């Protein structure tokens, strides 16, 4: 068996029973698992470890196998002597395990005490799953103490077993208050009592609880369970995703659940429901949520035997004018005509619904006919369609292809093809290459790696000029399959710009025809390959194609086991010879030192033309970072650097910083993600700000930053030698302790011009502190960009103070999620204040409402400084457009540049917009980004542009100039507007 681990490079998952293995057999087995060539990533061990020495052998695997990420243990009769060596291995600095799942007799205090030491010392461990059989109070206390420890890095916690007791929940509640890293909670509750649920929910609604995803299974479909849970929805503003498995919920349970979900303070954006929910009474309550919860964007339902009335009621809610759902995922028994008919009515009436995913079990011809009728309706706004199940039949595809011809809004198609027959594929491809098909992205999975599948598909590449993005998952393609695929991709008429391939493609016979594509397809710019253990010859052939003089690829993304010396040697030849290659993204698994040295030798070669480098995976090691920093010193073209760092230690950050602050380093934009918000990390980083005068942009994602870390970061940002002009902060930064030192930066760093903050549920005090900094007389911020849950009255109150007092602020970009009328009223009062100096306003989010637009148009009439307006409107109706246009036509409106992006704008909407050209004499430049503009829709717009009173000098439609310097571009106008 040990020889198998060394020689089989495709083996990723191993399930092993340990029963009747003696010490010698265990030692031999573990020797194989420790081999450097072993590629096992997930290891599941079950049975009985017979001795302490056997346990020690297993622990050595954890220390020496750098590819191992997931460990599942179901050990019988485990005692302290066997548990201690296992945990010693798990907490070893070299252990790379990220997910730990434990079953068996682990619900003992002594066992738990040993295990919790792992939580404190293994910073890579992110996911923990425990099956606990009747844990007593002391066991849960010890477990909770470990999970609450400041060094614990667990982000996902999954608990099963008899845990629905008051004492258990009391300890768990303490974890939610103190562990700021915990984001996901999965609980299976067996017969929870009322007091246990109350205590659990007390913890979930605590102000310090940072959970964003909650999944509950088990016996939770009781009113006593549901009532305290709904209080969580009202009080925990961080909770965004909710998944409930409900076993036969009665009417009262669903009523209570719905009351919580439709509460004004509920922030749930994704709702997933499973179980026996497809009843009329259940759906009646659920549809009330769709009407009243404006934050809900994604719905996933698994429907078991839905009756006709239940589906009718569900769909009545989905097509309600107030329903804000954008993504709908349906599974279960839905492949019936009675189910499909009311669903298709939703497609016609819900203009916000963009993404549809259906799992269809053996749909008959009538089901597909009804589905297709809905999808090709002129009012259907579906842009992304995903279908799974038994759909690859001739009759199914015949109906589906009608959608491609008639639905001009459909841009993305995802299909899982199980055993497709030749005729079905031919019909599918006939539809894909139809002149009216507007698909831009095609993703295919399943059994597609056959010549009979590939041949009709390649005809699509030749005839569909709109198809730009292709993603294929190929399982064991033979030589002929790749030859046919490549022939299609090489065709002069093929317009594919981005190609993504996964599956078993790391073979010479596969890569050789593919590399010919690189030489002959001049449109191909973006390449993404998932390579599983490519050998030397595979990489040689791949590199030959990439470094060919005719290769036009500008972006390469490589994933898989590529961090080997032989792989990197060939890849670096590409850097030296391909002058078009500008962007490189690598995910490095278990790279050795020599591999990194060779990679970096190529990156610092004088002929390397890369401008952006993105590295993910296991790169937070000194041996990785040292050769990389040499690149910073020698490659003067490299401007943008993005690193995802998993638990970098002090030495790693020291080496990285030394490279970034070198006088020859030319990095202008630095982007860092991962566990970087530590005092020691920030101390090194701030040295860079003081010494690197070229660094202009900094993007940081901060996970649970402590106060001292933020203080040190901000000390560096306000240093007199810091030359940063743009700062973008994401993650958990919406805290007063984070914001206070940041505002000091605004007062002292006069070079900082652009600020972008993603704020998760900022409270009143956070916004007050932020605003105090922004309105300080010494603040030099000129562009402010805010995202997150900011569209609240209290938030806007503080923000408008900035408009009145900060005379340097010129550009404002806001993404508004569900703004209420009072919030918009306050925002606009600030925008039209005489002291407001804003010249450019960009608004995104849910702003296509009459009440929002009416307030905004008052700004146009009163703010004479506002010159540039950019609006992203989701499905504005005629009334919204009428109000907007009235404001833009007002004699006092000073807008000169209008950037407008809309989704599914109707002819009447563009007719209103055309009135602006006649009525606003100041408007000089118009930039439109419209989905599916056809001749009928664009007619009123062009008529307005040709009006004698129109002063438009520049018009861009979807990135192409129609009017430039006052002259119409005849080249663009030769095409119909639908193709512009």
Image: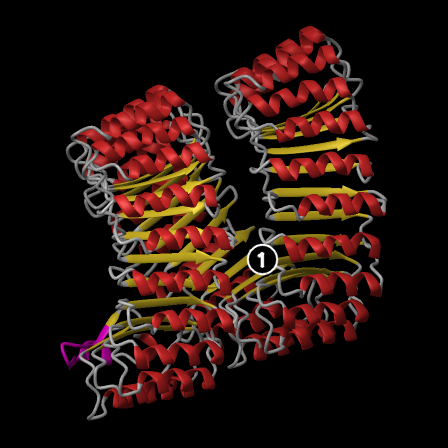
Residue 493 showing in the rendered view: no
Residue for point 38% across, 61% down: 461
Q: Position of residue 50 (x, y in %)?
A: 76, 11
Q: Residue 680's x, y, as percent?
A: 40, 26
Q: Is residue 249 above or below residue 684?
A: below
**664 or 193: which is nearer to us?**
193
Q: From what the image shows, is residue 293 above or below residue 482?
A: below
Residue 304 is left or right of residue 496, and the answer is right
Task: Note whether 827 is above or below 417 in the view shown.
Answer: below
Judged from the image, the secondary structure of the residue bearing numbered disc 1 is loop
Residue 507, picture quadrant: top left
Q: Which residues are magenta?
A: 961-973
Q: Quadrant of the C terminus?
A: bottom left
Percent position (x, y) of residue 417?
57, 56
The residue indicated by pointer 1 is: 420
Q: Is residue 652 visible?
A: yes
Tell me, yes or no, whether the highlighted magenta stretch contains residue 723. no
């Amino acid at each position: 068996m040990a020889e198998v681990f060394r020689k089989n490079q495709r083996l990723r998952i191993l399930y092993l029973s340990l029963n009747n293995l003696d010490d010698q057999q265990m030692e031999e087995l573990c020797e194989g698992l420790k081999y450097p060539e072993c590629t096992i990533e997930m290891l599941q061990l079950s049975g009985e470890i017979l001795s302490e020495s056997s346990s020690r052998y297993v622990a050595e695997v954890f220390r020496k196998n750098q590819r191992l990420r997931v460990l599942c243990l179901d050990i019988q009769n485990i005692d302290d002597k066997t548990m201690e060596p296992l945990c010693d291995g798990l907490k070893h600095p070299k252990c790379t395990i990220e997910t730990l799942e434990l079953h068996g007799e682990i619900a003992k205090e002594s066992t738990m005490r040993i295990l919790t030491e792992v939580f404190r010392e293994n910073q890579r461990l992110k996911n923990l799953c425990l099956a606990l059989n009747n844990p007593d109070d002391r066991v849960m206390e010890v477990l909770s103490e470990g999970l609450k420890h400041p060094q614990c890095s667990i982000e996902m916690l999954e608990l099963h077993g008899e845990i629905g007791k008051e004492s258990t929940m009391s300890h768990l509640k303490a974890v939610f208050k103190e562990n700021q890293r915990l984001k996901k909670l999965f609980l299976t509750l067996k017969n929870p009592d009322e007091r246990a649920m109350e205590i659990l929910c007390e913890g979930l609604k605590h102000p310090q609880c940072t959970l964003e995803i909650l999944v509950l299974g088990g016996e939770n479909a009781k009113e006593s369970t549901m009532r305290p849970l709904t209080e969580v929805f009202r009080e925990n503003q961080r909770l965004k995703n909710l998944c409930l498995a409900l076993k036969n919920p009665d009417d009262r349970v669903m009523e209570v659940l719905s009351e919580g979900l439709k509460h004004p303070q509920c922030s749930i954006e994704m709702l997933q429901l499973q179980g026996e929910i497809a009843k009329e009474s259940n759906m009646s309550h659920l549809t009330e949520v769709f009407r009243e919860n404006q934050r809900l964007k994604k719905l996933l339902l698994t429907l078991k035997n839905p009756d006709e009335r239940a589906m009718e009621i569900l769909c009545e809610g989905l097509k309600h004018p107030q329903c804000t759902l954008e993504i709908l995922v349906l599974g279960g028994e839905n492949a019936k005509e009675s189910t499909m008919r009311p669903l298709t009515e939703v497609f016609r009436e819900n203009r916000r619904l963009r993404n549809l995913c259906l799992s269809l079990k053996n749909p008959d011809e009538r089901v597909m006919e009804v589905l297709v009728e809905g999808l090709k309706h002129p009012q259907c706004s579906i842009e992304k369609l995903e279908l799974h199940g038994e759909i690859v039949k001739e009759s199914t595809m015949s109906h589906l292809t009608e959608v491609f011809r008639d639905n001009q809004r459909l841009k993305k198609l995802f299909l899982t093809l199980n055993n497709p027959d030749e005729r079905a594929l031919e019909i599918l491809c006939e539809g894909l290459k139809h002149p009216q098909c507007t698909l831009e992205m095609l993703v295919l999975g399943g059994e597609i790696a056959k010549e009979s599948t590939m041949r009709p598909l390649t005809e699509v590449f030749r005839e569909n000029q709109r198809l730009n993005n292709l993603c294929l998952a190929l399982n064991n393609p033979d030589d002929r399959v790749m030859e046919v695929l490549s022939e299609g991709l090489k065709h002069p008429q093929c317009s594919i710009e981005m190609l993504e391939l996964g599956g078993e493609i790391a073979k010479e016979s596969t890569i050789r025809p593919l590399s010919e594509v690189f030489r002959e397809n001049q449109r191909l710019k973006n390449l993404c390959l998932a390579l599983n253990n490519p050998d030397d010859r595979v990489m040689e052939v791949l590199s030959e194609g990439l470094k060919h003089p005719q290769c036009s690829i500008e972006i390469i993304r490589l994933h898989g086991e590529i961090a080997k010396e032989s792989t990197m040697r060939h890849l670096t030849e590409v850097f030296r010879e391909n002058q078009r290659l500008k962007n490189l993204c690598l995910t490095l698994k278990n790279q050795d030192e020599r591999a990194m040295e060779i990679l970096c030798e190529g990156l610092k070669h004088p002929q390397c033309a890369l401008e952006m480098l993105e590295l993910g995976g296991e790169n937070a090691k000194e041996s990785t970072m040292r050769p990389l920093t040499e690149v910073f010193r020698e490659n003067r073209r490299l401007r943008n650097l993005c690193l995802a760092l998993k638990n970098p230690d002090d030495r790693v950050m020291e080496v990285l910083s030394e490279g970034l602050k070198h006088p020859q380093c030319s990095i202008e934009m630095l982007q860092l993600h991962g566990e970087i918000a530590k005092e020691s990390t920030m101390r090194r980083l701030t040295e860079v700000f003081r010494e690197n005068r070229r660094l202009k942009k900094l993007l940081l994602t901060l996970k649970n930053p402590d106060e001292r870390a933020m203080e040190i970061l901000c000390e560096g940002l306000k240093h007199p030698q810091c030359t940063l002009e743009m700062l973008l902060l994401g993650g958990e930064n919406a805290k007063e302790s984070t914001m206070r030192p940041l505002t000091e930066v605004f007062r002292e760093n006069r070079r900082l011009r652009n600020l972008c903050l993603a704020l998760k549920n900022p409270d009143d005090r956070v916004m007050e502190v932020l605003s105090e900094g922004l309105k300080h007389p010494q603040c030099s911020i000129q562009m402010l960009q805010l995202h997150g849950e900011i569209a609240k009255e209290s938030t806007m109150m503080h923000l408008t103070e900035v408009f009145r007092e900060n005379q340097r602020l010129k550009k404002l970009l806001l993404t508004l999620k569900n703004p209420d009328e009072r919030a918009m009223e306050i925002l606009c009062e600030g925008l039209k204040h005489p002291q407001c100096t804003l010249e450019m306003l960009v608004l995104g989010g849910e702003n296509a409402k009459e009440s929002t637009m009416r307030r905004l148009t008052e700004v146009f009439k009163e703010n004479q400084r506002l010159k540039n307006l950019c609006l992203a409107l989701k499905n504005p109706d005629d009334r919204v457009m009428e109000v907007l246009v009235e404001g833009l036509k007002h004699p006092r409106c000073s807008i000169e540049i209008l950037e407008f992006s809309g989704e599914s704008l109707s002819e009447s909407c563009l007719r209103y917009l055309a009135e602006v050209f006649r009525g606003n004499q100041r408007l000089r430049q118009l930039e439109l980004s419209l989905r599916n503009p056809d001749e009928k829709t664009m007619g009123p717009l062009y008529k307005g542009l040709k009006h004698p009173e129109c002063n438009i000098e520049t018009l861009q439609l979807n990135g192409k100039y129609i009017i430039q310097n006052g002259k119409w571009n005849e080249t663009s106008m030769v095409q119909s507007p639908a193709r512009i």
